[in-house]
Amino acid sequence: MKIAGLGYGRQPVTVAQIFPRAPMNAICNILCLLFFLSGLGAMIAFRIFWARLRKQHAEAWEHLGRPLTILHPRFIKYLWRREYESLPDLKLVAFGRFLRAYFISSMILGVLTVLSLYIFASSSGFPGDTHK
């Protein structure tokens, strides 16, 4: 993939020249590992939050439709709209704030991971790619 206008004179610069392969490979590996660990951490943290919500605030749990996955639409809205703030449980509210920040940072990490994989793939080429 060539990027016009970034080279000296009239020669376009390739993505491989901007992002060398070895450092990009290391960055991709680190970001993928962090994103994977972030997902595991999110599953554990959300299970802890749900367990406390189910045991001590059954009405809120029922209102959410007894979520089974992290990406349950009602739970995402509940977290995003900060509806947990109305609960009288200060520890659960604090944990909800932490989860919201964790979820946002995980989304950002996911975008960075996908972007780095795209840059790495476009700079190193795919097998059989003859358009370099």
Image (cartoon, rainbow, N blue to C red):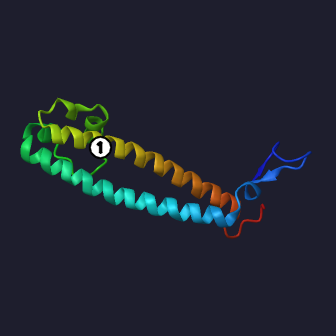
122 over 54 or under it: above or below: below
Q: Amino acid at mark 1?
A: Phe
How many marks are shown on the rendered structure? 1
Identity of the residue furthest to the bottom in this view: 127
Q: Quadrant of the C terminus?
A: bottom right
Q: What kind of element bears circle 1?
A: helix
Residue 108 % position (x, y): 47, 45
Quarter holding residue 14: bottom right
Q: Label 1: few (<14), some or many (≥20) within 10 Å?
A: few
Q: Quadrant of the N terminus?
A: bottom right
Along the viewing direction, whichever of 86 and 120 lies nearer the viewer: 86
Along the viewing direction, whichever of 120 and 95 lies nearer the viewer: 95
**Relative side of 76 to 91, left or right:** right
Quarter holding residue 44: bottom left
Along the viewing direction, whichever of 4 and 18 lies nearer the viewer: 18
* Residue at the image point whose x is 27% and y is 32% from the top: 82
**Relative side of 97 to 115, left or right:** left
* Residue at the image point whose x is 47% and y is 51% from the top: 110
Along the viewing direction, whichever of 37 and 76 lies nearer the viewer: 37
Residue 111 % position (x, y): 50, 48
Residue 77 % position (x, y): 29, 35
* Residue at the image point whose x is 28% and y is 56% from the top: 43
Residue 68 % position (x, y): 21, 52
* Residue at the image point whose x is 35% and y is 46% from the top: 102
For the question of whether residue 125 can be seen, the reply is: no
For the question of whether residue 42 can be seen, the reply is: yes
73 over 124 or under it: above or below: above
Quarter holding residue 105: top left
Residue behind mark 1: 98
